[in-house]
């Protein structure tokens, strides 16, 4: 059973556009929701993360929107750039009781110049 | 060296070979992880070690044998693998397993070992 469901699988956006990736989870015990970015030949790296006590977190062009009642969260990339082209993974964790990340399947983002 | 390093970066082996993957973290962390990354699949957690002790084995076949001699080093010993074991094997580390001081533990990943089993 997949703990975190991510969509879309791939996304093509024009430079300057908004990229939106969505994730959903079932386990209400999750209390930490990070997004990881992975470039070819590299391991995933933490991009931005949110705890369920807030509905939005913004860092530069990257924003997480979190809907606790719907058990959904999404990543928005504003003013998308070709350098943002990478694979993005959402994840969920019960970090306060048991540190174990459950990852989504990933979204391959391509930003065309 | 900084962060999390993995060697080798690429490995091709036959089904009867025995090989080992090495991971080293230079971050002073106490927890280390092995993940398997296959095409179009979520990252699959394989093993978790905390203070050198294995805390999780995610139903991994016995042909994968982990070893954690200290908090900085993690090995994955491979023997009699199958072609479907071909994947990117990622090592990660974190300060601890659960939140530390109320803050989540970020996992830092290495670049991975691309394994091909012929």
Image: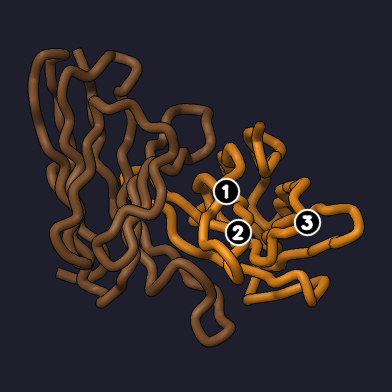
Chain colours: A orange, B brown
Q: Residue at x 15, y 31 (%)?
A: B11
Q: In the image shown, does A88 or A73 lie closer to the viewer?
A: A73
Q: Residue at x 37, y 32 (%)?
A: B60
Question: Which of the two labelled residues, at mark 2 and mark 3, occupies the earlier sequence position?
Answer: 3
Task: Kindly report the distance in space between the C-alpha atoms of the residues bearing marks 2 and 3.
Answer: 10 Å
Name the chain letter of the residue that bears numbered label 2. A
Q: In the image shown, does A30 or B42 lie closer to the viewer?
A: A30
Asked if labels 2 and 1 touch by Cβ distance under 8 angstroms, the answer is yes
Q: Residue at x 36, y 46 (%)?
A: B47
Q: Is residue B105 left or right of residue A15?
A: left
Dot label at residue A102: 1
The N terminus of chain A sits in image quarter: top right
Q: Are marks 2 and 3 on the same chain?
A: yes
Task: Kindly report the distance in space between the C-alpha atoms of the residues bearing marks 1 and 2.
Answer: 6 Å
Q: Secondary structure at mark 2?
A: strand
Q: Is residue B74 left or right of residue B20?
A: right
Q: Are marks 1 and 3 on the same chain?
A: yes
Q: Is residue A55 visible?
A: yes
Q: List x then y, in percent, for residue A89.
A: 57, 48
Name the chain letter of the residue that bears numbered label 3. A
Q: In the image shown, does A100 or A113 lie closer to the viewer?
A: A100
Q: List x then y, in percent, for residue A39.
A: 41, 49
Question: Which of the two labelled residues, at mark 1 and mark 3, occupies the earlier sequence position?
Answer: 3
Q: List x then y, in percent, for residue A23.
A: 73, 47
């Amino acid at each position: 059973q997949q703990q975190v469901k991510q969509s879309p699988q791939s996304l093509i956006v024009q430079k300057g556009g908004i990229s939106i990736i969505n994730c959903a989870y079932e386990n209400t015990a999750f209390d930490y929701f990070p997004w990881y970015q992975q470039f070819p030949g590299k391991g995933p790296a933490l991009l931005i993360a949110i705890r369920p006590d807030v509905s939005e977190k913004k860092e530069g062009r990257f924003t997480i929107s979190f809907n606790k009642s719907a058990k959904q969260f999404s990543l928005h990339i504003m003013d998308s750039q070709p350098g943002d082209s990478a694979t993005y993974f959402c994840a969920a964790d019960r970090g306060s009781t048991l540190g174990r990340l459950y990852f989504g399947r990933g979204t391959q983002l391509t930003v065309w110049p | 060296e900084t962060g999390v390093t993995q060697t080798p970066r690429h490995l091709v082996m036959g089904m009867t070979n025995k090989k080992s993957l090495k991971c080293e973290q230079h971050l002073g962390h106490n927890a280390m992880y092995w993940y398997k990354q296959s095409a179009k699949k979520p990252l699959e957690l394989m093993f978790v070690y905390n203070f050198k002790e294995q805390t999780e084995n995610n139903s991994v076949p016995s042909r994968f044998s982990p070893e954690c001699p200290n908090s900085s080093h993690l090995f994955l010993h491979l023997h009699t693998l199958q072609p479907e074991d071909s994947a990117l094997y990622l090592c990660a580390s974190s300060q601890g397993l659960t939140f530390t001081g109320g803050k989540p533990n970020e996992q830092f990943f290495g670049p991975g070992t691309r394994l091909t089993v012929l």
